[in-house]
Image (cartoon, rainbow, N blue to C red):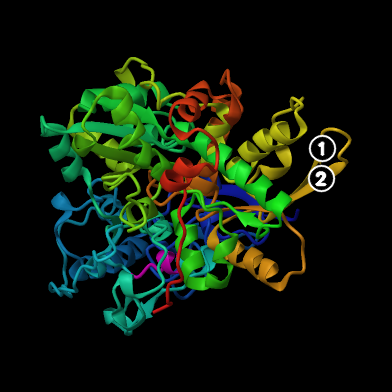
Amino acid sequence: MDTVKVTIDRKTVEVGSGSTVLEAAEKAGVQIPTLCQHPDQSIKANCRVCVVEVEGSRVLQPACAFPVSDGMVIGTRTPKVLEARRTVVELLLAHHPQDCLICERNTRCDLQDITHELGIRDVAFPRDERHLPIDDSSGAVVRDPDKCINCRRCIEACTVTQGIGILSTVNRGYDSVVSTGLNRSLTDVPCVLCGQCIQVCPVGALREKDDTDRVWQALADPQKHVVVQTAPAVRVALGEDLGMPLGSSNTKRMVTALRRLGFDRVFDTDFTADLTILEEGHELLSRIKNGGKLPMMTSCSPGWIKFMEHYFPDLLDHLSTCKSPQQMFGALAKTYYPEKAGVDPSQVFSVSVMPCTAKKFEANRPEMNSSGYTDVDAVLTTRELAQMITQAGIDFSALPEEEYDSPLGISTGAAVIFGATGGVMEAALRTVYEVVTGKELANLDFEAVRGMEGIRKATVTLELPDDGGALDVKVAIAHTLSQARELMELVRSGKEELHFIEIMSCPGGCIGGGGQPRPTTNEVRRSRSKAIYGEDQGMTLRKSHENPAVKTLYEEFLKEPLGEKSHHLLHTKYSPRSLY
């Protein structure tokens, strides 16, 4: 690769030809503030906070977009640069609400950090707040356009990453702001509530609907029996907001923290992830044997389900009828668990901790009350749980490690990998292979379905018993809804034969969910994914059909996969939604 030498703040570095000033500065160890720049997105150069002085250039240049050339001399802290940055930030602050102390992003806000870094203590421009209405109609994602700084990160996340495109810039100049078409509420546009816009927002303009007060109230109510389930992706991300290293798994420490918060029972969503594999695996085999609708598609990701309802209603019968593990757990928490524990189901308050904002929407769907009650009463994101642990004054790093409660806390490695893209597929293949062939897998790791690449495809050959020949099961995996759209168009065209498809709404799967700690970049996703697969490797049981608690559940309560009670409690169907 061709290289060039540039001097940044009197330090000379050698970088690849075509590098930006920002990239060269990073190599030189020089920090340049940014707002619109994001490591996983395209260059926008619209905030102008990163301007630098380039010797020989008449005007200041944006470091995120300006390419270096050999011999270039750059100043990142000259009086002219600092004055320009302060002016840009002061103009933003003149438009911005001054409620930092009560803002959800307080102490974790990019605008706040840059204001402090530049030493801004006064704003030279008159206050000009817009007083735009907050949109909290969806029950999952909240838009506060008054706090929008027009960085347009959310637009790219919605349009490019997710292929939805409900957000765009409206108005012009100083009055421009990101909004929906005709400023409709999120309930009146085909938003899937995935929360990827929240993940990239540098300020408090986008956030999840906070359910912590409802959970605190339930925990304080002596009449309530409060149980909690934790999703697989939470355990490898929670520590990031509580002072633990990136990529560390804190499963047992998390369990202890939840008990300290006052939950009566601490269970694991992994239990019903194993249960999902039993139900979903048998559903797939039934469709293959009996001429059912193929390819069958996973139904664990609520953003993906809502996407299908809006954009591909003609393919809804391809979805597995299985509820997500969260909702399966909620149904059992109000039926099987009270029966086992001798608890009044009407007093059970069921909480889930999820990496996903769309799970809040899913819990409130009218289909999710097969127990006779609301199956899941409240959904907390990973960030909200971290907030509660901090509010309770718990020193997370000093906690001892404790185990989940039985019986809904017993799980396998197959359930843990649900948290990463390709994990549901791999878990299903481990079980389907052994159920069909009657043989034990020599290698449980299906490497072909792992990774962060685009759409992945694989063929798994199942040797049928009694000389029944072989069955080639063709599978595909996609993460992000832009990839899902591409795969659905392929299914709709009928050009490729597939049996089973896994879709996860968010980049990297649940490890990159909209409710995970910020920042969630591709580098962070890879660290979390590594931790997920590390948990799987360390488990004694790594196949869902070997979970002894799930076996007992069938013996005592459900009787058989796809049986009458399973169908009532664990399965559902979805209906088309209009685009507007």
Q: Which mark is residue 189?
A: none
- The structure residue drawn at horizontal position 37% and vertical position 36%, both measured from the top left corner, is 332
- The structure residue drawn at horizontal position 28% and vertical position 38%, both measured from the top left corner, is 350
Q: Position of residue 181 (x, y in %)?
A: 36, 81
User: Residue beneath label 2, please?
Assistant: 471
Residue type at mark 1 is: Leu
Q: Position of residue 24 (x, y in %)?
A: 56, 53
| Disc 1, SS | loop
Work out whether residue 136 can be spotted.
Answer: yes
The answer for how far apart the CA atoms under marks 2 and 1 are is 7 Å
Q: Are marks 2 and 1 in contact (CB under 8 Å)?
A: yes
Residue 276 falls within the magenta-colored stretch? no
Q: Nearer the viewer, residue 316 or 266?
A: 316
Residue type at mark 2 is: Leu
Q: Residues within 10 Å of mark 2 (few under 14, many from 20)?
A: some
Q: Position of residue 475 (x, y in %)?
A: 71, 51
- Residue 46: quadrant of the picture: bottom left
Looking at the magenta stretch, what is its main secondary structure?
helix
Please report the bounds of the magenta region as a residue range: 150-157
Q: Is residue 527 left or right of residue 292?
A: left
User: Residue beneath label 1, please?
Assistant: 464
Q: Residues within 10 Å of mark 1 (few under 14, many from 20)?
A: some
Q: Is residue 334 above or below residue 119?
A: above
- The structure residue drawn at horizontal position 28% and vertical position 46%, both measured from the top left corner, is 372
